[in-house]
Image (spheres, coloured by chain):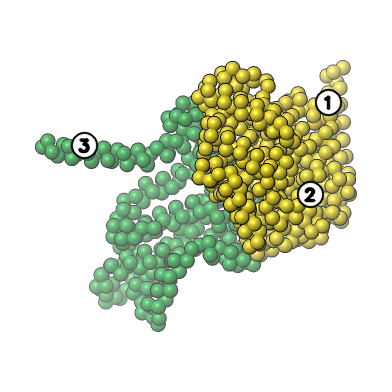
Chain colours: A yellow, B green
Amino acid sequence: MHRKSLPLAAIGAVGLLALAGCSPASGGDSGQTTEVTVWHYWDGTNADTFDEMVDEYNSAHPDVEVSASNVPNADFLTKLRASATSKTLPDIAIGDLVWVPEIEQLGSLVDLTPLLPAETLDDITPALTSFGTIDGKQVSVPVSANNLAYMYNKTLYQEAGLDPDSPPTTWEELMADGKTILEKTGKPGYDLFTEAGDTGEGLTWNFQVNLWQAGGQFLTEDNSAAAFNTPAGKQALQFWVDLIDSGVSPYAKWGEFEKGQGGSAQEGSWMVGIWAADPPFEFGTAKAPYPKDGTPATNLGGEQAMVFGNSDASSQAAADFLAWFLEPEQVTSWSEATGMLPVTTSVATGSEYLDWVDQTEPRLRPFVEQMADAHARPNTPLYPKISLAFAQQIEKALSGDATVDEALDAAEQAVNDVIAKG
Amino acid sequence: MRRSLRVNLARHVVLIAGAAFVVVPFLWMFTTALQTRAETYTNTSIFPTSWHWENFVKAWEAAPFGQYYLNSIVMAVGIVAGHLVLDALAAYAFARLSFPFKNAIFVVLLAALLIPTFVTIIPAYAIVADLGWIDTYWGLIVPRLADVFGIILLRQFFTSIPQEIEDAARIDGCSRIGIFFRVIVPLSTPAFATLAIFSFLFAWNDFLWPLLVTNTDEVRTIQIGLASFVGRYGTSWNYLMAGTLTATIPSIVVFLFFQRALVRGIATTGLKD
């Protein structure tokens, strides 16, 4: 009985897949093949999974030929800018969500609202759609998501005499656990990203989590001025300075946790996917700890897809492909294969995906649940410059060259200068 | 006797330190290439402690590296051939022929050496795109067929060849072209070897231009393939190093092959890149 039902079920599943693959009405004339080129920076499992899904789509849609091409992430924007000068842009670019406002300035992104089914757009996690909304147009849709949470070394927790199954939930507990680890093992308890570096973003996007948790905002609602120089901002920065002063988070020592030499760190959900197959040490995950009097929050990352208006036919075909990619089945299979988080509410809260998480990768659970508390970074083309200016000033407080108040004042000034210059 | 021993010893200490300085990065590459992904995070040893030779196979399977390798060779051979032929012809003209504004043109060429490549990349890209050469070998090779450095290097060498040899060939009835191919070229092998090595290394290691003008695996070069191991979400150090090691082999082979000529070439022309 079991033996027979398995192949039958498989045939049924294939049939269903084929049907689902055909469901969005592709508007192109039959007989003519519309080519859709996609540039993305995914590598490894992500790239392999995407290629398989593209193949699946192509075989179900003989009138469309989607071809995907990897562009290394460090030079992705350079290549897009060069291509924009000579009308050699791809039909779809899939890039980091913070790039969307900059790419929009290249000038040929298509408004996806009329091209995508309304129910697809409605299903996307709101914080993720808000990001691609520029001047009333929907210039991007999310295709993959991640966020930041607490990751810790269970072995070190045990060595320090702490319970490896009860990670900290508040800043106060995080500080206490960190001190215990430092005392008992001599290793830092919690890595902080304290250096601005070339982009500043490593520091800034980690800090934003604590800023939002304390009730603060990074920029004003309309992105016209800095909004972090408030009691909430002071509370967040003071928390970092206290962590550094106590020795729990040594200055300029990010990476100890990843080497197995530190107790914990705030890490992205992708690390679960990277480490799960062959963990360098036994690690656990928990929601990002927040202050006792604060609120849970995390920072959103991931990829957004943008469509360049090369022709009406290619834009529609590109949008049809994205609509297919955002159907629950594809969102589920993408998320399960890559360890990225689902971008649609129906999948993120549906039992099928959540059961898979609980059975296969329970360490993703805190990340999935955090999607409800996730904030998006400011949606402005100036963001990369703002992020660097902010990080350079804040680092001075972390290195001990400025007080918390001085650093926040200077950062506010620097960010407002960047915005004023435009 | 005593003293020379001490000097010898000191010399060898310095040389060994210098050799270690050069070899250690390669050793680290080799060690990392043999580690599992988990070990690349936690391992601190400079010598190999585990032997995962399958990383080399996996790195090659991660992308069509055979095709990338072939494309890199086609591009490098095309560029080297272009440099040797076109640079030599131009260099000979500047060294021996007299034509109007010769010196002015040569100064302009020298000035072109000062312009960073990045400045010309976008206009060059626009031309290649207009010609429809995006994603073709043409786009990879043609814009880099000649370069100023090679012209200057060869011109310096050609002018050092005594004019009398040429005059003698002339008297014996040899044509201008005959002199070039039968007298100048055979006498200039060290300079050609130097140019060939520099051109090969430039072509083999070039990243930005091939990245801009290629989109598909059919024409992509090995450096772009390697860059895909440096992911947004973390670098696969073991595969990156395994791939880099295999990509380094042609450079080492070319260098060993031309090494003696190269040293002579640098010594005689006084130029290095």
Sooner in the amino-acid sequence: mark 2 or mark 1:
1
Q: CA distance from mark 3 to mark 2?
A: 70 Å
Amino acid at pointer 3: Leu
Report the side of A101 relative to A129 (left or right): left
Q: Are marks 3 and 2 in contact (CB under 8 Å)?
A: no
**Which residue is depicted at the point 30% across and 69% down?**
B159
Q: Are marks 2 and 1 in contact (CB under 8 Å)?
A: no
Label 3 SS: helix
Q: Could you tell me how far apart the alpha carbons at marks 2 and 1 are, in whole angstroms?
A: 44 Å
**B248 relative to B100, above or below:** above
- Which amino acid does the dot numbered 2 rest on? Ser
Residue topped by disc 1: A7
Choose mark 1 or mark 3, whichever is in front.
Answer: 3
Q: Residue at x 26, y 37 (%)?
A: B13
Chain letter behind tag 2: A
- The residue indicated by pointer 3 is B9
In the picture shown, does residue B245 fall above or below A355?
below
Crowding at mark 1 (Cα within 10 Å: few <14, some 14-19, many 20+): few
Where the C terminus of chain A falls, by quadrant?
Answer: bottom right
Question: Which residue is identified by label 2?
Answer: A130
Whether marks 2 and 1 lie on the same chain: yes
Q: Residues within 10 Å of mark 2 (few under 14, many from 20)?
A: some
Marks 3 and 2: same chain? no
Three-letter residue code for mark 1: Pro
Q: What percent of the width, then of the height, locates residue B117? A: 50, 62
Query: Looking at the rendering, which quadrant does residue B168 occupy?
Result: bottom left
Residue closest to the eye, A272 or A315: A272
Q: State left or right for residue B41 relative to residue A283.
A: left
